[in-house]
Image: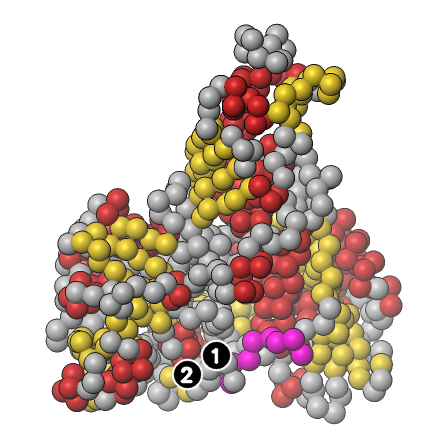
Amino acid sequence: MMKNEKNPPLDRVDGRMKVTGGAKYFADFAIPNMTYCVIVGSTIARGTITSVDTKKAQGAPGVLGVFTHQNMPPIPGWDGPASKQADGPPPKPDTEEKYRILSSPKILFDGQPIAMVVADTFERATYAASLVKATYSKQTTRTDLEKHKKDEITPRGGDYARGDAKAFESAPVQLESEYTIPIEVHNPMELHGIIAHWTGADQLMVYAKTQGVNSTQQAMAQAFKLDPKNIHVHTEFMGGGFGMGLRTWPQETATVAIAKKVGRPVKLVMHRSQMFTMVGHRPYTAQSIQMGADKNGKLVSIHHAATAETAKYEDFTEATVNMTKFMYDCPNVSTRYRLVRLDRSVPIWMRGPGEATGAFALESAMDEMAHKLNMDPIEFRLKNYSETDPEHNRPYSSKHLKEAYERGAEAIGWKDRKNEPGKSKEDNWLAGYGMSTGVFNAFRWEASARVVLNADGSLVVQSAVTDIGPGTGTALTMIAHNVLDIPFERIKVEYGDTSLPKAPSQGGSAIVSAVGSAVFDTCTKIKNDLFELATKAGAPLAGSKAADLSIENGNVFISNDSSKKVAITELLKANNLPSIAQTADSKGSAELEKYSMYSFSVHFVKVKVNALTGAVRVTKAVSVADSGRIVSPKTAASQMIGGVTGGIGMALTEEAIIDHRYGRFVNNNFADYHVAVHADVPAIETIFIDKPDPIINPMGAKGMGEIALIGFSAAVANAVFNATGKRIRQLPITPDKVM
Ligand code: MOS
């Protein structure tokens, strides 16, 4: 187990670099002879290109190539059936259509690339792209899930049930509600794209906006039929990912093919509007909940159904209804998950994927039921608290949710909440409190690390993992420090490059657990090496047993007699070692299978609602995480604040709106798609239970990226109800719905 009680909170190790321009994002890499690619998107969502005129574009200054379905260079790995396509999960055999970029005149979604234009400057490419003109034969466009629900399909694992399916009918207290969440778009600050640079006939260098360099390497290896060793991918920093960088998108692969054809490095940076159509989104999802309880507030049954949009060419599924299966101790539970294939681009995971959507419904319904029962919402949840996982009938690896409820309630001032809605006024605004629970799987994925201890006492930690923003370098520094007690400033973390030991993609709130464990194991090996050097014959601590040794302040010493010690630097020098290097592959044991591993969160908010305008302001937010031991308190708090900020956007403003007559977005920009900004965000208090999980990994750390967002929007909706008496079940909670 890791000690870290004595650690001072460490500032983000790359913070200075990030705010002074020292951190290089993919598009910052300058390569001699660079060229620039701009995508021309379709202006229809369904139909066929009847003509595409590229003559003017080709003749424009600086243009090096205009690529359409008529002259797109081949992507050799895509020559086979489209199901072999290497840009993500293979299309299910039963999807109606295939999408392969610039390979056919068929248009399957709004903004689908119809041309990629390459020129010697970005401005010239942009101008030339504006000269590409296409004509289309349009077909009837279906983008509205509400209209086409009857066309649902059942993905694998679409249904779940335990107990009595009819229990609801005889439940003394019944609730039936419907909820929708709109299309949400990740919209990280950094735009998506790639730099493709063929450094030899079969040697590829890629700077990409990806959450996993190894996964991009693999995708490119398949697409171009190359040995992964010949592909070098670098992504050290990312200006936010939120899930959109968890696959290699077709336009990235196309850029690599085009770079080969053009014979020069090609940089693609997408336009903000293209971030709405080409790099995934959170799918529009309609949900319904049927909940039954007895008069004392014990849950009798829950049925949770969700129908989400997907593309016609690929089924995207997520765990929307999963939380309902185990969150509460309820004997009769069923869930139903369906997809409707629309003329839309394919969704992808977006922070708290699935659960953020499902928790809005379940945690709103819990609040509605508590109100029906005239119970306090926390009391109602405690009454139905699941001590063990009722879905899998096994213990949780750790669960401190009760304490999270208590501490959050204390911090928000829950005692000031009136259970009867619409009863509190502050400065002429209605005031209310709301809360909700969040949960997300805690994982232990396989990862590797390399650590080098130099004779000067400095340490280098290496992993291919990318930092999408949470502060991975800081957390890994902390873990290495905790094992070897090397001062923070003498530890350097190198990451985000395929030349380094393999790591999973940064996602699923899983990186501290996966890569952190690998770093922990590798540092432990080095510690053991040092103990061996210190105790071998002739060494200063010869005759002592390794088990009796400790390491602190650059010295190896006998634990109960710190006067007997030797400096690490001396040990290396005496043995003529310029450094000690170790690597470790780390993964969970079979023991983990005996447990359900989840991180939990509780969100509390206070809102004010303007009774005249319907404006909702979140005036206070407290989020409590039970995510095991907190390895890096400062960056963990930042991550929680970021998640809550996203949650405020999700609750109040974020909605990508499609004009269903055309199947096209009408607000595909930052002005009309409003992500929460400073003016929307109050001071956010973060509380960590900070109790190590005894099962998941040597640090005892569970994940916390997703739970920072999951459930938050329900807490806001519940607070709006408490303030106004109006229940809003369609996100976002805009003034028109409040009035
Ligand atoms: Mo996250 S949706 O796993 O980037």
Q: Residue at x 52, y 19 (%)?
A: 574
Residue 498 shown left or right of residue 477 in the figure = left
Crowding at label 1, few (<14), some or many (≥20) Cα neighbours within 10 Å? many
Which quadrant is the N terminus positioned in?
Answer: top right
The percent position of residue 222, horizontal first and vertical second, equals 23, 52
The answer to which of 548 and 539 lies nearer the viewer is 539
- Quarter residue 268 falls in: bottom left
Q: Which residue is mark 1?
A: 656
Secondary structure of the residue carrying tag 1 is loop
Q: Can residue 20 be seen? A: yes
Q: Is residue 392 above or below residue 225?
A: above
Tag 2: amino acid: Phe
The percent position of residue 727, horizontal first and vertical second, equals 68, 77
**Cα distance, mark 2 to mark 1?**
7 Å
The answer to which of 204 and 221 lies nearer the viewer is 204
Residue that extends furthest to the bottom in the rendered view of this protein: 612
Q: Which residue is mark 2?
A: 665
Q: Residue 65 — which label?
A: none
Is most of the magenta stretch helix, strand or loop?
Answer: loop
Start-end of magenta stretch: 672-679
Whether tag 2 and tag 1 are in contact, CB under 8 A, the answer is yes
The answer to which of 286 and 560 lies nearer the viewer is 560
Q: Residue at x 40, y 53 (%)?
A: 212
Residue 278 located within the stretch drawn in magenta: no
The answer to which of 252 and 495 lies nearer the viewer is 495
The percent position of residue 247, horizontal first and vertical second, equals 36, 58
Q: Residue at x 60, y 10 (%)?
A: 542
Protein image colouring:
secondary structure
Q: Is residue 54 above or below residue 362?
A: below
Residue 677 located within the stretch drawn in magenta: yes
Tag 1: amino acid: Ala
